[in-house]
Amino acid sequence: MVPIGISQGNNKWFKGQYMKELAPTWPMLKMNQEDYDKEFFKILSKLDAREIYDNLPDNAVLLCYEKFNDKCHRRAVAEWLEKELGIEVCEYGLKREESFPYAECCEANKGKLRKPENKEQPKQEYQGKMSFEEWMKSGIGGTRPDLFDVEQLPAVKARRASMKREQEKKLGGLV
């Protein structure tokens, strides 16, 4: 698995490769959904899907900030690649049919699995947190760290310990 960031900003928890050409522009992030979608699809229409796909490493996973099945450009990019190249693009750890079409992604479906065989079934939502390793093995999917307990990551533990030492130094100097 090779994570590829497709967000405009560089995420604090991800220091890997980005493909900014697949990200919305900063001004787009302030647009209403209809205008955002028009602008984003204009961006995609100017790109060569085959070239983008060929530039992705094997086992690439597209990353941004949203949960799966939220209104996220990651799903729009996936559907664009599917349409242009006749391929299937799944969310990490999910079956393709568990992702809502981009047009149906919204706050109500955020983080939920689509059950196309019976739309009357209640949608399942991930509950609670797990370790990063459990999340990777779980197949739940999504690309946001809010699915797992980020406090367990070594970098977060180290920063928290450093902050605690700094605070203890400050408090020690006041006493």
Image: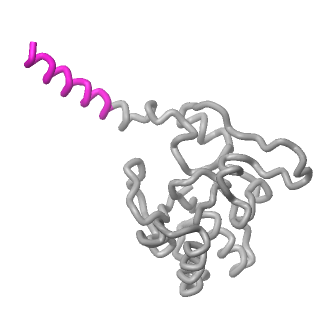
Which is nearer the eye, 27 or 99? 27
* Residue drawn where x is 62% and y is 31% of the image: 128
* Residue drawn where x is 54% and y is 87% of the image: 46
Magenta stretch encompasses residue 121: no
- Magenta stretch: helix, strand or loop mostly: helix
Q: How many numbered circles does the render carry?
A: 0
How was the colour assigned to the protein in this rendering?
one colour
Which is nearer the eye, 70 or 11? 70
Which is nearer the eye, 95 or 137? 95
Q: Find residue 83 and report its horizontal and vertical position in percent.
A: 72, 78
Q: Which of the 4 image quarters holds residue 73? A: bottom right
* Residue drawn where x is 67% and y is 43% of the image: 140
Q: As drawn, which residue projects farthest toward the front?
A: 32
* Residue drawn where x is 74% and y is 77% of the image: 86
Q: Find residue 5 and report its horizontal and vertical position in percent.
A: 47, 61
158 sits left or right of 124 in the view: left
1 sits left or right of 21 in the view: right
Q: Measured along the vertical axis of the image, is residue 1 above or below residue 53?
A: above
Residues in magenta?
Answer: 158-175
Locate the C terminus by quadrant: top left
Locate the N terminus by quadrant: bottom right
Which is nearer the eye, 137 or 145? 145
Q: Find residue 51 and report its horizontal and vertical position in percent.
A: 55, 82
Q: Measured along the vertical axis of the image, is residue 145 above or below residue 69?
A: above
121 sits left or right of 105 in the view: right
Q: Which of the 4 image quarters holds residue 18? A: bottom left
Magenta stretch encompasses residue 163: yes
Q: Find residue 72 and report its horizontal and vertical position in percent.
A: 59, 61
